[in-house]
Image (cartoon, rainbow, N blue to C red):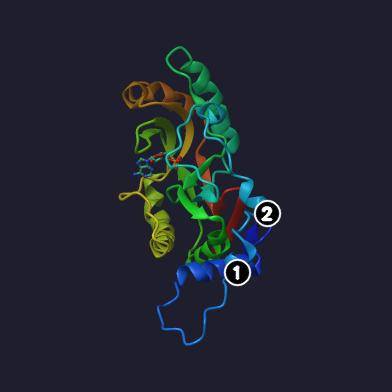
Amino acid sequence: MALVDYGGSSSSASEDEELIESTHPPTMVALKRPALPTAAALLGPKKPKPEEFVEDVVDDPALHGGRIRSFKHERGNWATYVYVPATACVDQLEEFQTEAISNLSSDLELQPNESLHLSLSRTVVLQYHQIDEFSRSLQAALNSSAGFAATLKGLRIYTNEERTRTFIAAPLDAAFVEKMTAILQPIDQVMLDYRLQPFYDPASFHVSLLWCVGDQQTLLNSKLAELQELLEDQDTLPLAVNKVHLKSGNKDFAYILK
Ligand code: AMP
């Protein structure tokens, strides 16, 4: 399986060493020789590398469309998720986004999702030095996963767990849930290996199209038939599941499926 890194530079040896150190804490043994000073003692505290600053922003909700972060933003914490891009039907979905925003403008302020994708993980947090190792684990885990051609069908309303955001989404056609679950399983296993939370159980695969602040599930469910009509003007919505992507901070990796 081919791996494509669309992102920044790959990790250096020292970053890999850092991971090994942190995953294998030194065992307690009685030292016969006086201990040598550590690198940290000689060099002082480690300075973050320039690329570690990329995600380092002040958490001002106004800067991210009024969204409220679900995890505390700290230097070196990289928001990470696994996904399938919804490239094949992007024009149809964008047309729906525009129409839905104008149709519901008197009821609530909807924002279009910029990256149209089907998530195969929650958004988890990785440390910068874990990213390349995590990517390699994911690539190995997906090595025997087979791609397929799927479609999206209908609309469904979701909220995030904190109910601070509501989403209008196009769910994966039920006929493809089994095949998508087969791709999700190795991804969930990698999450568990890294002591990260696996995906929702049961998973409800979907492509989020629009979102708004707060819990607007009741209102949007009452508008679902109206929205559905807008989508019915579109032909079938194809989703080519031939690549799985990993996004971590500003890095994007792609794993081509068999
Ligand atoms: P996403 O577009 O992948 O970010 O998904 C939008 C929201 O759907 C996320 O904030 C999830 O918390 C929410 N969601 C709620 N229930 C589920 C579920 N069973 N499977 C997947 N996503 C879910």
Q: Nearer the viewer, residue 238 or 243?
A: 243
Q: Name the mark on residue 8.
A: 2
Q: Nearer the viewer, residue 77 or 145?
A: 77
Q: Nearer the viewer, residue 43 or 215?
A: 43
Query: Counting residues from the N terminus, which is met first, the one under dot 2 or under dot 1?
Result: 2
| Residue type beneath disc 1 | Ala
The answer to whether any part of residue 143 appears in the image is: no
Give the CA distance from mark 2 to mark 1. 27 Å
Most extreme residue toward the top is: 106
Q: Residues within 10 Å of mark 1 (few under 14, many from 20)?
A: few
The quadrant of the rendering that contains the N terminus is bottom right
The quadrant in which residue 192 appears is: bottom left
The spot of residue 159 in percent (x, y) is 37, 34
Residue under the image location 53 percent in, 22 percent down = 99
Q: Is residue 239 left or right of residue 30?
A: right
Residue receiving disc 1: 39
Most extreme residue toward the bottom is: 32
The spot of residue 249 in percent (x, y) is 57, 48
| Residue type beneath disc 2 | Gly
The spot of residue 107 in percent (x, y) is 42, 14
Most extreme residue toward the front is: 34
The spot of residue 2 in percent (x, y) is 62, 65
